[in-house]
């Protein structure tokens, strides 16, 4: 019996599910629902029992199932269908057709409202990550690092695996070096935090920085304390380096002193000295008073949260007035003991060596109140004060140990440089095997020259030192490129509106890293709207042939500060290439020479100024001229009151102090002769083109275009600037 006949007769068939095996082990289900709900009449009793399997074998339904896709039919009650017709579909509404004809009226309504554009949420930019600093410590887990960094745990786990560490759980402790590597891969800055648990904490000597204005006697005061004469050996009589040494006081105590330059160009050195010190000795000259660098030293000490002890020097001079100095310091917000504060004031004289015992007592009292202690066990924490390049020993770094013990032979990472400590020398230049807290030492054995202000980190192996150094170099280069792009964008934006600035490329070479930074910062302060000083390269050491080649490629001049004169071969090559090499040993002379060079190279600004003035004394009129010569002409008879009047210049007519007309001079005569210029005190006849309304008493000004060059200005404190 065919399936169609069953459907026609309304035979009730039970629901059956047939699973047909398909390819790849899958099955397709075909369900036949009940075709008729009510049984048919009794005439179907004679029909034999229906077998569905035999039905499928004897009909063409099997062939139909093999060719056509399987369809599932669903039946609903009339109530459900009626309810669905009344419901409006969710989403777009279809327009209802009111006119069923061929043409229907277009509905004119309000245009659809467009949703406003919502920009995506900004992701973390490299600039924001560059400014973020997190604290890391030994034994930090991945969960804690992710919480501080604000990154997913899975991301940090992948970085840890790439670093070469095994990760079994996010709660495994990490070494402080691995934590720094992970943070640098993300783009964060780190600050190492060391714990003192389980270590010996012992008292240590104070680290004292001497700060103040230039030529106020800082180095002379230190010479009086340590019985030396360093000030007499310095170039120009001023300190241009940051020195560190230990002084044994008369009481038997040892104090570590840092001597900072007082010149305005060495602001970064004073900031480094205040950052590593415990106490700041502010030296003020009694005959000079509070000066700009005095105020700057006070601000550096306040930013570093370091106590101040004031030493009023040069009290032996006739013009000394210590009370005036105290009043000035109190007016600047320094709470002196005489005024009810907690800042000690000592009157000393470095030349007469008076008041030194009082200064020593004040420093020891301040150090005792601070209760200075440090751990001596474990890896050392040190701070680079200065770095220089020695011809025989290579890169050398002067450092002060803050905590722990620095041992000869350890692998260290200093900034982005690394190395194995080959030798440690104390302040007197003697070799030592280790350095304890508050001890200034000079270490050698680094692969490259570090930057002044870098931290010294002790690592376990050479492999870890290489890895940490390369990671820091990548981050340093990345941050430097970001900074260069930002500066380029900032300089290009105003350049579209204003005049274009001329670029002066410069190569800076100095004896130590700190003076390189000082000279570079001083050159940047000389930038003006007309000229931009571009420091293309800096280095430590004397001028070499590679510097000359680089200067030839970019058209730069070479500045050598406190370095030896270059070899004759290098000087000859520079002379043939037309490259200027400036060698100086005093910062004053260097800045003055560079300032004059900038003034000469600057294009200047074109300005209009008054070259001469003439007063109208009488008016003459020429009539009856021929048509070929033109109309009647009025001539102003003038006397030149100031400067000179030139025929080729632009003239301006002033009446009662106001400009009435501005034009060019058509004719200039003196004693019936055409002249080009009339000087002061002489009389002349003058005709102005397109103007004949002269009155007695009018002022005629002769204008000329001049190019004004910028000025190099240097203050008493050493601060320089270019004024346009």
Image: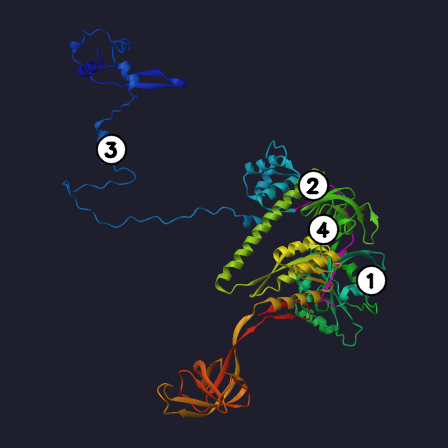
Distance from Cα at disc 3 to Cα at disc 4 = 80 Å
| Residue at numbered disc 4 | 383
- Please give left or right for residue 333 compared with residue 367 in the image: left
Mark 3 vs 1, N-terminal side: 3
Q: CA distance from mark 4 to mark 1?
A: 25 Å
Q: Secondary structure at mark 4?
A: strand
Which one is earlier in the sequence, the residue at label 3 or at label 2? 3
Q: Is residue 660 magenta?
A: no
Residue 538 in view: no
Q: Mark 3 touching mark 4, by CB under 8 A?
A: no
Tell me which residue sits at (40%, 83%) in the image: 690
Relative to residue 194, is residue 235 depicted above or below?
Answer: below
Q: Quadrant of the N terminus?
A: top left
The residue identified by callout 1 is 225
Q: Is residue 663 visible?
A: yes
Identify the mark at residue 465; answer none if there is no mark: 2
Of the two numbered discs 4 and 1 in the rendering, the one whose residue sits closer to the viewer: 4
Magenta stretch bounds: 192-215
Which comes before the other along the chain, label 4 or label 1?
1
Q: Is residue 211 magenta?
A: yes
Toward which corner of the image does residue 600 lie, by quadrant? bottom right
In the image, 374 versus 412, the foreground residue is 412
Q: How far from the left and from the top, in percent, is residue 143? A: 58, 38
| C-alpha span from label 3 to label 2 | 74 Å
| Residue 84: mark | 3
The residue shown at (55%, 63%) is 501
């Amino acid at each position: 019996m065919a399936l169609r006949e069953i459907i026609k007769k309304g035979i009730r068939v039970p629901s059956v599910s047939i699973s047909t095996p398909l390819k790849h082990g899958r099955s397709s289900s075909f369900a036949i629902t009940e075709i008729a709900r009510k049984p048919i009449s009794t005439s179907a009793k004679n029909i034999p029992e229906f077998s569905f399997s035999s039905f499928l074998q004897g009909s063409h339904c099997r062939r139909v199932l093999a060719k056509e896709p399987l369809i599932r039919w669903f039946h609903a009650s009339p109530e459900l269908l009626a309810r669905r017709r009344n419901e409006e579909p969710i989403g777009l509404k279809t327009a209802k057709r009111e006119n069923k004809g061929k043409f229907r009226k277009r509905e004119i309504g309000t245009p659809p409202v467009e949703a406003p554009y919502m920009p995506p949420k900004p992701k973390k930019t490299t600039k924001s990550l560059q400014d973020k600093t997190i604290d890391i410590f030994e034994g930090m887990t991945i969960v804690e690092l992710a919480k501080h960094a604000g990154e997913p745990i899975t991301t940090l786990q992948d970085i840890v695996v790439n670093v070469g560490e095994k990760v079994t759980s996010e709660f495994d402790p990490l070494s402080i070096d691995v934590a720094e590597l992970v943070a640098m891969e993300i783009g964060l800055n780190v600050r190492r935090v060391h714990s003192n648990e389980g270590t010996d904490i012992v008292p240590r000597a104070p680290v004292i920085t001497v700060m103040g204005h230039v030529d106020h006697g800082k180095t002379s005061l230190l010479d009086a304390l340590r019985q030396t004469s360093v000030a007499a050996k310095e170039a120009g009589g001023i300190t241009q380096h940051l020195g560190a040494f230990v002084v044994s006081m008369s009481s038997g105590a040892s104090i570590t002193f840092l001597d900072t330059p007082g010149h305005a160009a060495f602001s970064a050195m004073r900031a480094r000295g205040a950052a590593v010190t415990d106490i700041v000795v502010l030296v003020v000259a009694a005959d000079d008073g509070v000066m700009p660098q005095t105020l700057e030293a006070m601000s550096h000490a306040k930013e570093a949260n370091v106590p101040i002890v004031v030493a009023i020097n040069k009290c032996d001079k006739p013009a000394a007035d210590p009370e005036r100095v105290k009043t000035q310091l109190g007016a600047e917000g320094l709470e002196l003991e005489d005024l009810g504060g907690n800042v000690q004031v000592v009157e000393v004289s470095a030349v007469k060596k008076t008041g030194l015992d009082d200064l020593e007592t004040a420093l020891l009292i301040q150090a005792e109140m601070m209760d200075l202690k440090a751990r001596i066990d474990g890896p050392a924490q040190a701070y680079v004060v200065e770095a220089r390049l020695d011809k025989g020993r290579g890169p050398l770094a002067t450092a002060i140990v803050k905590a722990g013990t620095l041992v000869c032979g350890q692998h260290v990472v200093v900034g982005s440089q690394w190395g194995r400590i080959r030798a440690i020398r104390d302040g007197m230049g003697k070799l030592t095997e280790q350095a304890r807290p508050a001890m200034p030492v000079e270490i050698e054995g680094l692969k490259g020259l570090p930057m002044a202000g870098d931290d010294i980190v002790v690592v376990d192996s050479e492999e870890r030192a290489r890895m940490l150094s390369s990671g820091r170099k990548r981050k340093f280069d990345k941050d430097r490129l970001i900074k260069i792009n930002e500066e380029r964008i900032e300089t290009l934006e105003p350049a579209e509106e204003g005049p274009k600035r001329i670029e002066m490329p410069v190569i800076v070479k100095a004896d130590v890293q700190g003076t390189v930074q000082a000279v570079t910062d001083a050159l940047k302060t000389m930038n003006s709207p007309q000229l931009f000083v571009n420091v293309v390269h800096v280095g430590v050491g004397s001028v070499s042939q590679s510097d000359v080649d680089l200067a030839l490629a970019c058209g730069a001049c070479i500045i050598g500060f406190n370095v030896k004169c270059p070899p004759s071969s290098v000087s000859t090559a520079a002379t043939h290439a037309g490259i200027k090499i400036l060698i100086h040993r005093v910062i004053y002379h260097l800045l003055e020479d560079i300032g004059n060079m900038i003034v000469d190279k600057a294009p200047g600004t074109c300005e209009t100024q008054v070259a001469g003035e003439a007063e109208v004394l009488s008016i003459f009129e020429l009539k009856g001229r021929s048509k070929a010569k033109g109309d009647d002409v009025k001539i102003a008879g003038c006397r030149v009151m100031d400067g000179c009047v030139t025929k080729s210049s632009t003239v301006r007519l002033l009446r009662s102090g106001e400009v009435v007309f501005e034009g060019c001079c058509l004719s200039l005569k003196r004693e019936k002769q055409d002249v080009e210029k009339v000087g002061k005190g002489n009389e002349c006849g003058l005709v102005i083109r397109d103007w004949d309304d002269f009155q007695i008493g009018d002022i005629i000004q002769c204008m000329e275009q001049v190019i004004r060059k910028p000025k190099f200005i240097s203050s008493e404190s050493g601060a320089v600037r270019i004024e346009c």
